[in-house]
Image (cartoon, rainbow, N blue to C red):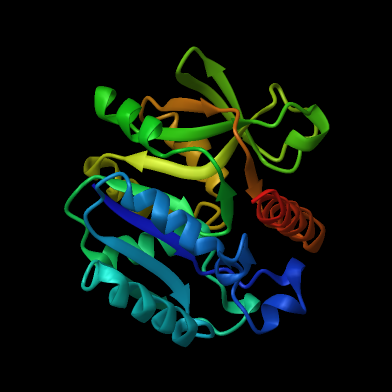
Amino acid sequence: MDALILCGGFATRLEPITLFVPKPLLPIGGKPILDHIIENVERQGIGRIVLSTNRKFGDQFEYWIGNWKASGLDGKISLITEPTMHDGEKFGAIKGINYAIERAGFADDLLVIAGDNYFSFDLGRLIGAYRKTGKPTIAVHNIKSVEGATRFGVVEMDGDIVKGFEEKPQHPKSTYISTGIYALPKETLGRFSEYVSDGNNPDAPGYFLQWLIKKEKIYGVVYNEDWHDIGTVDTYREVFEKHLHMGLGSSSDE
């Protein structure tokens, strides 16, 4: 299994911070969000790791990759750069995934992860569940708030099967939300090109899942551990300060 980490957004809701630093490289707990993701991915025995980003932040990710190569991942992490410089040119998540798939030439199953995710759960359970069925499997988080669920893609579950999906509904049917983490069989990767070619919404992944569920059975793995979409300054401040206090607490206890 290979991994694709999505870092192509411009994060306008976090400006002015993200005018200069891409969201996946913002620090939490003393290191970039992306470091947390890579460490989790590495524990799963993943093959290739491909980052997709935009031309504005390409140099920063190249530098970041250089540091990881120096730590022993030489040749394992690579970068695909979309020809976009600002939010008005952005591809959108689904078109960006398709762009990366076409250029990376993935020949194996694929783990797709949104690069602005901060989560404490281990990806091993998702990958293990996926390998039992060989079907598209998504990581689901129980946000435990109907109001909170309105900001995300809401998942309806029947056991471990995804029965329905709705992007940012006004009246959510559950408190289960998609985390932007998917384990996909290689046979499903061509669906992205099919979806984009049909003129569907190229942005929020939820629209792709709504479309895909009509064509393939999708499974879900529910996690109750911490998960955060670092989408706003307030969310970033909350998670940053939480880990700052955790660090101060641990050092004072020693």
Q: How many marks?
A: 0
Q: Look at 74% across and 43% down and name the residue there.
A: 151
Where is residue 234 drawn, in percent x and y?
82, 58
- Which residue is at the front of the view, 204 or 53? 53
Where is residue 188 drawn, in percent x and y?
29, 42
Residue 229 position (above or below residue 121): below
Can you see residue 127?
yes
- Which residue is at the front of the view, 32 or 186? 32
Q: Horizontal placement of 180 versus 17: left or right?
A: left
- Which residue is at the front of the view, 160 or 118? 118
Q: Residue 50: which quarter of the image?
A: bottom left
Q: Look at 43% across and 36% down and name the residue there.
A: 212
Furthest residue in direction left, as rendered: 107
Furthest residue in direction front, as rendered: 254
Q: Look at 46% across and 73% down and name the residue there.
A: 53
Where is residue 37 drawn, in percent x and y?
46, 55
Residue 155 position (above or below residue 233): above
Can you see residue 194?
no
Residue 127 position (above or below residue 67): above
Where is residue 241 drawn, in percent x and y?
77, 57
Q: Residue 100: which quarter of the image?
A: bottom left
Q: Horizontal placement of 235 versus 31: left or right?
A: right
Q: Residue 214: which quarter of the image?
A: top left
